[in-house]
């Protein structure tokens, strides 16, 4: 049973380019969360999605950032026109049932995608 | 005021020492509490949940004080492998909010 799979693990982009980060949740998990961790800082919530729905995007910057979790395929976090301040580790986590169920409290994290903007 | 506050450390302790971390939170609607562990450049991993009555898992003991809005983690008989950043985490609804973490370094 594979865990949460994120790719790419490392991504280098120049300012102005686009970054796409992908996340496949654990088997049986239908809830996906994206967090960003800047160097030497804690994790900051970005967005919470279920299949085909954005449930909470209160942590997403208003511009250049978007997320989706289509019916088929992984969740994608897209950053357009990247700037140096976007350099960070982006962690995806999944849980089975959101606010319901015994496992809902616990998030399982992927290994993260480290974005470096030159 | 941050939602979850932790002393960033680092806490430098010798092997075998007992060390305690505290964490304070501001949202009284917080429903569940956890300690996660994060090794350098790795993903966070659940260490233990924190229950109102306090709970223990081997060398680790967690306590919750709802009235004062803080939780604590006690590590007894520290091992070199305990060196990591310990993240205080609380849940409100579907949201998990992370503290900035406390860094622990256990020295031989």
Image (cartoon, coloured by chain):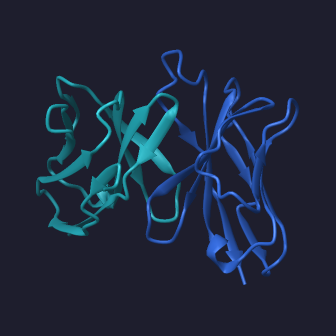
Chain colours: A blue, B cyan
Residue at 52%, 65% in the rendered image: B41
- Viewport quadrant of the N terminus of chain B: bottom left
Residue shown at 67%/79% (left/top)?
A84
Is residue A3 in view from this perspective?
no
> Outermost residue, front direction?
A62
Quadrant for residue B71, please give it. Answer: top left
Residue B3 or residue A77, whichever sits in front: B3
Q: Position of residue A5 (x, y in %)?
A: 70, 45
Q: Is residue A13 above or below residue B78?
A: below
Q: Number of labelled discs?
A: 0
Write the residue at 28% across / 44% down: B25
Residue at the farthest bottom position: A118
Q: Looking at the image, can residue B99 be seen?
A: yes
Vertical arrangement, residue A55 with respect to residue A60, above or below: above
> In this image, B108 relative to A27: left or right?
left
Instruction: Find residue B72 and report its image quarter.
Output: top left
Up the image or down, B52 lies above or below B60; here it is above
Give the percent coordinates (x, y) of residue A71.
86, 29
Task: Return the residue found at the far right.
Answer: A72
The x and y percentages for residue A100 are 53, 16
Q: On the picture, is A87 further left or further right than B49?
A: right
Could you say where residue A66 lies in the image, as x and y percent from the top left?
Answer: 76, 52
| Side of B72 relative to B97 (left or right) | left
Quadrant showing the C terminus of chain B: bottom left
Q: Nearer the viewer, residue A62 or B11?
A: A62
Residue lying furthest left: B17
């Amino acid at each position: 049973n594979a865990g949460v799979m994120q790719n790419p693990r490392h991504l280098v982009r120049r300012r102005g380019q686009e970054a796409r980060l992908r996340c496949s949740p654990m088997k049986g998990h239908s809830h996906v969360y994206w967090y960003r961790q800047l160097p030497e800082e804690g994790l900051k919530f970005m967005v919470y999605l279920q299949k085909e729905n954005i449930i909470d995007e209160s942590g997403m910057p208003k511009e250049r950032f978007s997320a989706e979790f289509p019916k088929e395929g992984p969740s994608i976090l897209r950053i357009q026109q990247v700037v140096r301040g976007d350099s960070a580790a982006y962690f995806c986590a999944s849980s089975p049932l959101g606010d319901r169920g015994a496992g809902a409290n616990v998030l399982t994290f992927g290994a993260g995608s480290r974005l470096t903007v030159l | 005021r941050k939602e979850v506050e932790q002393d960033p450390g680092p806490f430098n302790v010798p092997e075998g020492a007992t060390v305690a971390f505290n964490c304070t939170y501001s949202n009284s609607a917080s429903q569940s509490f956890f300690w996660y562990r994060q090794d350098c450049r790795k993903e966070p991993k659940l260490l233990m949940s924190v229950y109102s009555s306090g709970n223990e898992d081997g060398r680790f003991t967690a306590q919750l004080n709802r009235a004062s809005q803080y939780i604590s983690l006690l590590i007894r008989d520290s091992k070199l492998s305990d060196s990591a950043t310990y993240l205080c985490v609380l849940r409100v609804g579907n949201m998990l909010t992370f503290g900035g973490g406390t860094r622990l370094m256990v020295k031989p």
